[in-house]
């Protein structure tokens, strides 16, 4: 084991061998469209595809913050077209690289992933004939959140690499998530993204209104299990019932 940025590090090599992504024709067709311009491996693409396939009963749009050249975002839009009756997918990025790198992000300086543009991603959206994508350029949430703020959300992919962006994105989206909705943190499994690890462990893990799963592909997957009000209200109801010995 090594220690890097104060965190334990080793190559994560689970022993499982069932590999459905190798024979899932619709996934492979979508992945073939996007895999040449991504920072994300096939395992995480497949997880996003399978999660999107399962949220038909959860109301709300899909959102990605951290699009870069568009790979995972376009995969989500292809999944929404196939499984979710073309549900709306919002793709948010500065398209000018990482912002808000700070003391919790020793690997990042800011400006990484600037080798993209809004036009390049728009071209890829059009090349795939996607009519369900809204592109939002600017720093999320302060510059682009207002254009989505009235929407409920069902599946959110946060792939922003640094602490403040992950934190501010999560706290903006969480009250807008439907119960049963899912937030996926792309960066949790990489010590280079120490700030995202810190945020997830400090503030996401252990919430009463969610369940955080550490998928060993590197994702942290947070499932919303209750509305923000559900905890206190349920506790009050339980307290009243207890008073009556029930
Ligand atoms: C690792 S890249 C995303 C990779 C992408 N999901 C893929 O499929 O390859 C991280 C992106 O997050 C964006 N980003 C980070 N913080 C942001 C913020 N607060 N608002 C908007 N974009 C942000 C950066 O501009 C960068 O393009």
Image: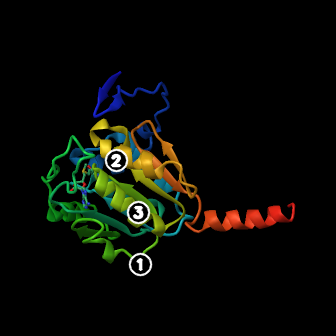
Query: Which image quadrant: the N terminus?
Result: top left
Q: Which residue is mark 1?
A: 150
x and y percent of residue 182 in the render?
48, 57
Query: Which of marks 3 and 1 precedes in the sequence?
Result: 1
Query: Which of marks 1 and 2 precedes in the sequence?
Result: 1
Residue at 43% x, 48% y is 202
x and y percent of residue 203 in the render?
44, 52
Please tell me whether mark 1 or mark 3 is closer to you in this view. Answer: 3
- Whether residue 236 is visible here, answered yes or no, is yes
Side of 117 where 75 appears, left or right: right
Q: Which residue is mark 3?
A: 171
Q: Which residue is mark 2?
A: 196
Q: Is residue 21 above or below residue 115?
A: above
Please tell me whether mark 2 or mark 1 is closer to you in this view. Answer: 2
Density class for disc 3 (Cα within 10 Å; few <14, some 14-19, many ≥20) is few
Residue at 35% x, 25% y is 10
Q: Is residue 177 above or below residue 11?
A: below
Residue at 50% x, 31% y is 18
- In contact (CB < 8 Å): disc 2 and disc 1: no
Query: Which image quadrant: the C terminus?
Result: bottom right
- In contact (CB < 8 Å): disc 1 and disc 3: no
Mark identifier at residue 215: none
The one nearer the camera, 66 or 43, is 66
- Whether residue 77 is visible here, answered yes or no, is no
Side of 158 where 178 appears, left or right: right
């Amino acid at each position: 084991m090594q220690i890097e940025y104060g965190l334990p590090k080793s190559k994560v090599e689970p022993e499982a061998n069932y590999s459905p992504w190798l024979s899932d024709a619709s996934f492979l067709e979508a992945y073939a469209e996007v895999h040449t311009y991504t920072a994300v491996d096939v395992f995480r693409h497949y997880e996003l595809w399978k999660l999107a396939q399962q949220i038909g009963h959860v109301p709300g749009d899909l959102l990605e913050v951290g699009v870069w050249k568009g790979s995972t975002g376009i995969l989500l839009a292809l999944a929404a077209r196939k499984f979710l009756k073309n549900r709306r997918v919002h793709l948010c990025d500065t398209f000018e690289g990482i912002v808000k790198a700070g003391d919790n992000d020793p690997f990042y300086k800011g400006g990484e992933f600037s080798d993209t543009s809004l036009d390049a991603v728009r071209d890829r959206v059009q090349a795939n004939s996607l009519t369900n994508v809204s592109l939002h350029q600017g720093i999320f949430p302060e510059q682009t959140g207002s254009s989505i703020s009235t929407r409920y959300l069902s599946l959110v992919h946060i792939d922003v690499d640094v602490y403040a962006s992950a934190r501010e994105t999560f706290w903006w989206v969480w009250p807008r998530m439907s119960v049963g909705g899912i937030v996926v943190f792309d960066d949790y499994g990489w010590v280079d993204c120490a700030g995202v690890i810190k945020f997830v462990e400090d503030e996401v893990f252990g919430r009463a209104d969610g369940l955080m799963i550490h998928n060993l592909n590197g994702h942290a997957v947070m499932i919303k299990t209750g509305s923000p009000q559900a905890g206190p209200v349920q506790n009050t109801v339980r307290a009243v019932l207890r008073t009556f010995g029930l």
